Image (spheres, rainbow, N blue to C red):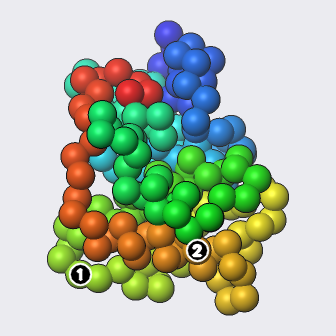
Amino acid sequence: MPGDVRLLWVLRDVLGVTGPKYGCGINVCKACTSHVNGKAVSPCSVPVSELRPGDEVTTIEGLAGDDGLHPMQQAWIDHDVSQCGYCQPGQIMAAVDLVRRVAAEGRAITDDDLDGIRNICRCGTYPPHPAGDQSRRRAHVSARQTSRTPPRQTPATSGTPGR
């Protein structure tokens, strides 16, 4: 595979992993957000040549464990966050990354942290400013709830994209 092929195309077109969505192709909308080695990335902007043997790629499909949904996925359901659903995998993956980073810093999640998630909503249900928007407030509640849940280890993917 040519080194300039983006990870998103390998995930979607080669491996058939459809959770990361194509939205912009230029690392702006974040609909494709996935994790590489536990950190949020936009696969549309990651050439496969930047991946190394042993890198762990996790998409929304690999977030749940053998014992069920990841706490963030469950919180998203419990708080009825989802609207059209197109951008939801990227939003969940970004929120999981945020909660992990804040926990590693040993502090509570703040509104500024939550407002720093810059995923763009295609259907317009999640405007950039949370004031007055019920769905975005529910997403914030989900992230806060999950930040109080003991961290759960996601299964290793052994360098296999998508799981």
* Rendering coords of residue 151 (x, y %): 22, 59
Of residues 82 and 96, the one nearer the viewer is: 82
Disc 1 target residue: 107
Q: Residue at x 29, y 27 (%)?
A: 157
Q: Position of residue 127 (x, y in %)?
A: 73, 74
Q: Which mark lies nearer to you, 2 or 1?
A: 2
Q: Would you place residue 102 above or below residue 7 in this image?
A: below
On the image, the x and y values in percent for residue 38 come to 30, 46
- State which quadrant residue 25 falls in: top right
- Secondary structure state at the residue bearing disc 2: helix
Spatial CA span between label 2 and label 1 = 21 Å
Q: Which residue in the protein does label 2 denote?
A: 138
Q: Is residue 125 left or right of residue 65?
A: right
Q: Is residue 8 left or right of residue 127?
A: left
Q: Is residue 6 visible?
A: no
- Element carrying mark 1: loop
Is 78 situated left or right of 22 in this image?
left
**Type of amino acid under label 1:** Arg
Nearest to the observer: residue 91 or residue 49? 91
